[in-house]
Image (tube, helix red, strand yellow):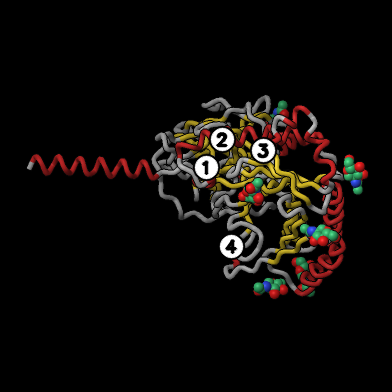
């Protein structure tokens, strides 16, 4: 009897070990490596980011296009229009140190051409107001992507779109139509109705956990905390505040992952366009709730519940570098930074710009508003922005299965003159 009991314990213990082992770090998953190599790859990525920062000032926009970091083969691709420039660049001592990581590739479109075309394409979108397009410069394809996503368009809107596509055809941008069978999955605000809650028992609210807008019955994710001289706020995504016409003072946000819903605070500021940023004032936060600036991640390989924010990192500016998010529905997932400064024209008056586009990063309904960050080691992160939405999964297009767009941190802080809170426990 005792023996069997012992075996049972052993069995349970082993099963437990297997489960622990199977928990892959989200970066290990993204990069296709074992957890043991994540730190090494973070170092590797940092070296390539440094190569990129060193090189960039020497790349003039007429002879070069963008660069792209390839973590798997430890190279930085430098898209080059005029290959005769390469020896010149390599003769610069700071750059030469990185020579073995650099891979110069011939392309036709210079950055200067791409930027001026993008600017014309943007101007035309603002004039003509086509419905349901997402536009950005895609470095890997050395071109501008105009992604036409599923949106409800009446006949005149279809005409406007067709006319727009005709008028921008002079720039030879890549126009990508996405036809999904499930229109619910099209580019859309990633919020959801209450019902997903599987009440995890914590009485602290972390960045990335579920929050609930009781008035509009919308679930989103907590972004991160910011402050001005007198107040502390929680940032989330703008469309977590539905029905902009209703008085803001009525809108209260509650926790979802506590034993009972607890008051976080009231909405005090909200803008959806051109940037998607509401602020929740936490002055009247529930006495039963502790606020942490840590990013919620219950499945870390180290049994932690959070990732720590350190603000010494610089926001990602290298194409191909990783970015991750923490969200209520799909937890922590990671992807590659594909593009900066994209815009989304969802409907004629709904224009959002300065968006960062990330491929491969799974985001689902309810993840909107969650923090976006880069790992500086396995458990420390630098905040880069918040999840604003995503494009649908695409098949047979040059885009990855998951495509999210992000509002950059500096936009959030500068728009409203705020400071990021990085102390572990946020003072109210
Ligand atoms: C490195 O990998 C990228 C994408 O994974 C590929 O496009 C590129 O050609 C590779 N570069 C070299 C030098 O193998
Ligand atoms: C390409 O670069 C070489 C070397 O700097 C320069 O002499 C040449 O004029 C450039 N070609 C063009 C078309 O700009
Ligand atoms: C670049 O231009 C050349 C000459 O016009 C053309 O043959 C080539 O296919 C172009 N390359 C790409 C990638 O478009
Ligand atoms: C199409 O929709 C737009 C925007 O809602 C509206 O202004 C326009 O009148 C509609 N046109 C037709 C023909 O229904
Ligand atoms: C996708 O939709 C566009 C525009 O409605 C249409 O022109 C195209 O044929 C569709 N493509 C497929 C594969 O269904
Ligand atoms: C801080 O934000 C609060 C709430 O929006 C506002 O009333 C106050 O004036 C702000 N303080 C400063 C110094 O900007």
The C terminus lies in quadrant: top right
Mark 1 neighbour density, 10 Å: few (under 14) some (14–19) many (20 or more): many
At 62% from the left and 33% from the top, the residue drawn is 46
> CA separation, marks 1 and 3?
21 Å
Residue 185 numbered tag? 4
138 vs 123, nearest the viewer: 138
Mark 3 neighbour density, 10 Å: few (under 14) some (14–19) many (20 or more): some
Is 255 on the left or on the right of 418, as rendered?
Answer: left
Give the image location of residue 180, x and y in percent: 61, 68
Disc 1: which residue = 27
Would you say the beta carbon of the disc 1 residue lies within 8 angstroms of ligand 1?
A: no
Disc 2: which residue = 42
Visible residue check, residue 58: yes
Disc 3: which residue = 101
At 16% from the left and 42% from the top, the residue drawn is 7
In terms of sequence position, does the residue under pointer 4 or pointer 1 come before the other? 1
Would you say the beta carbon of the disc 4 residue lies within 8 angstroms of ligand 5?
A: no
């Amino acid at each position: 009897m005792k023996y069997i009991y012992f075996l049972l314990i052993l069995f349970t213990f082993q099963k437990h070990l297997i489960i622990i082992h199977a928990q892959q770090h989200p970066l290990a998953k993204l990069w296709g490596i074992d957890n043991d190599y994540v730190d090494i790859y973070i170092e590797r990525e940092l070296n390539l980011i440094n190569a990129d920062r060193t090189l960039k000032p020497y790349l003039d926009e007429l002879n070069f296009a963008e660069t792209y970091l390839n973590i798997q083969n430890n190279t930085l691709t430098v898209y080059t229009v005029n290959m005769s420039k390469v020896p010149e660049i390599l003769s610069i001592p700071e750059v030469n140190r990185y020579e073995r990581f650099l891979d110069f590739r011939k392309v036709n479109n210079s950055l200067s051409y791409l930027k001026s075309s993008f600017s014309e394409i943007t101007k035309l979108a603002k004039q003509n107001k086509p419905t349901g397009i997402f536009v950005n410069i895609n470095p890997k394809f050395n071109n501008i992507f105009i992604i036409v996503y599923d949106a409800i368009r009446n006949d005149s809107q279809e005409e406007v779109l067709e006319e727009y596509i005709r008028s921008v055809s002079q720039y030879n941008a890549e126009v990508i139509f996405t036809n999904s069978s499930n229109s619910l999955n099209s580019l859309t605000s990633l919020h959801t109705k209450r019902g997903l809650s599987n009440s995890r028992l914590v009485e602290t609210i972390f960045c990335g956990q579920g929050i609930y807008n009781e008035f509009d019955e919308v679930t989103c994710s907590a972004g991160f905390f910011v402050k001005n001289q007198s107040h502390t706020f929680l940032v989330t995504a703008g469309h977590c505040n539905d029905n902009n016409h209703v008085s803001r003072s009525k809108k209260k946000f509650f926790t979802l992952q506590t034993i009972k819903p607890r008051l976080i605070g009231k909405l005090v500021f909200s803008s959806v366009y051109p940037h998607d940023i509401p602020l929740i004032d936490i002055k009247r936060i529930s006495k039963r709730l502790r606020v942490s600036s840590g990013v919620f991640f219950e499945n870390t390989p180290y049994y932690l519940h959070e990732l720590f924010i350190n603000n010494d990192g610089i926001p990602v500016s290298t194409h191909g570098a990783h970015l991750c998010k923490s969200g209520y529905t799909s937890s922590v997932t990671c992807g590659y930074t594909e593009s900066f400064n994209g815009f989304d024209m969802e409907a004629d008056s709904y224009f959002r710009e300065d968006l960062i586009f990330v491929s491969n990063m799974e985001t689902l309904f309810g993840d909107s508003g969650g923090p976006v960050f880069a790992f500086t080691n396995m458990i420390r992160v630098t905040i880069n922005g918040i999840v604003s939405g995503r494009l649908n999964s695409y098949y047979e297009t040059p885009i990855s299965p998951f495509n999210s767009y992000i509002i950059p941190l500096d936009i959030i802080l500068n728009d409203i003159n705020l400071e990021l809170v990085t102390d572990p426990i946020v003072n109210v």
